[in-house]
Amino acid sequence: MADHIRLAPYTTLGLGGPARAFTEAATAEELVELVADADRRKEPLLVLGGGSNLVVSDDGFDGLVIRVTSQGVAVSSDGDQVLVTVEAGQDWDPLVAMAVAEGWSGIECLSGIPGVVGSTPIQNVGAYGQVVADTIRCVRVFDRRTRQVLDLEARQCAFAYRDSVFKRDLGRYVVLGVTYALDRVDLSGAIAYKELAGRLGVALDERVPLAEARAAVIELRRGKGMVLDPDDPDTRSAGSFFTNPVLSAGEAGELELRAAGHPRWDMPGGMVKVPAAWLIEQAGFPKGYARGAVRISTKHTLALTHPGGGTTADLLALAREVRDGVREKFGVTLVNEPVLLGVTLDG
């Protein structure tokens, strides 16, 4: 246990003040013990993974931060599928690389995403037509309310677009490990994302060798500054800062009056998803738009980056400027995707 450890080095943004107390949990059992002890003492608690989806206040965190470092992968069979059970602290992308090398299909389009396994079910991490909800069999958690270790089946996780029961009831569940059910096949899932299909030179719904899908996804992500690279300031971000708005039919109709022919994806139940990047650019915020020491990525308008020398307050001021500009022009309110610790976009 250490006191007053700066959190900035533990986040991909490189921002954030100190934690009053900081420790690491190398096993699931140790993590449960530390969390339960903090709860008994009623101590404010943050369970930290890879810090890739987190914005921390400049004032830091007045409580205990537990960084999850548990490692381990266990493999078993279930018919034509392989069940891969992974400890929460395992880095995500090496797991994807392992699955591709072994001929396990289902997460190849999630290549290059920073962070650890335990974070993936919380956000229902997704990219290029795949989401982890498609492959998660169960999530092992510590329920801080009942003080029990539980295995939640996928249906109990209430997965939705960038959402889950873990996000809706944030803080209740601590993810200890995740079991993924992957197909034993050397081909990717059906390519469902137009940009990826174009890079691969195939039609939508075609399948390609796993290694080709992974390589194409990483190439696309790198071109957007979404693969961590210490030599590329655009990668000092929390990934996509805003989610793509999902609008009701009525809201979509209002947007169509303001921006006829805008890009959109039809969703179940008459809902419509709109690309946040398009809204941001059309509202007057181009790639590279800067506010002091922070800026919109020069490669991708959804990422807010911190090349260095800035503060969380600077980043949030830019985020508010973008959000308010989009709302004024299009009547659509963008919602942040990263977890905000000790700060909000409303103040």
Image: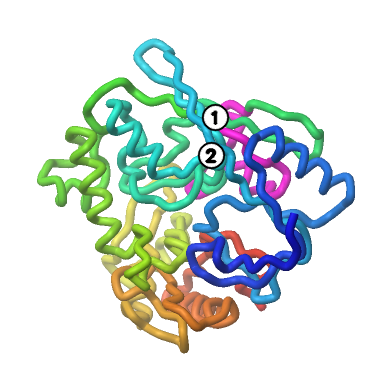
Closer-to-camera residue (138/346):
138
Q: Give whichever of discs 2 and 1 has the lower sequence position.
A: 1
Horizontal side of 150 relative to 85 (left or right) equals: right
Asked whether residue 101 is drawn in magenta, I would say no
Q: Position of residue 204 (x, y in %)?
A: 19, 41
Give yes or no for contact between labels 2 and 1 (Cβ–Cβ under 8 Å): yes
Closer-to-camera residue (25/75):
25
The local crowd at label 2, few if under 14, some if 14 to 19, many if 20 or more residues have their Cα within 10 Å, is many
Label 1 sits on what residue type? Answer: Ala
Q: Is residue 15 above or below residue 175?
A: below
Asked whether residue 170 is drawn in magenta, I would say yes
Horizontal side of 140 relative to 13 (left or right) equals: right
Q: Dot 2: what SS?
A: loop
Q: Dot 1: what SS?
A: helix
The residue pinned by badge 1 equals 154
Write the residue at 56% across / 77% down: 316
Q: Position of residue 82 (x, y in %)?
A: 40, 20
Write the residue at 61% across / 71% down: 16
The label number, if any, that marks residue 178 in the structure image? none
Residue 325 visible, this angle: no
Q: Which residues are magenta?
A: 152-178
Q: Report how far apart the C-alphas of labels 2 and 1 lie in the structure.
A: 8 Å
The residue pinned by badge 2 equals 159
Label 2 sits on what residue type? Answer: Phe
Q: Residue furthest bottom?
A: 292
Q: Quadrant of residue 60?
A: bottom right
Q: Is residue 10 above or below residue 89?
A: below
The local crowd at label 1, few if under 14, some if 14 to 19, many if 20 or more residues have their Cα within 10 Å, is some
Write the residue at 46% across / 28% down: 180
Q: Position of residue 15 (x, y in %)?
A: 56, 72
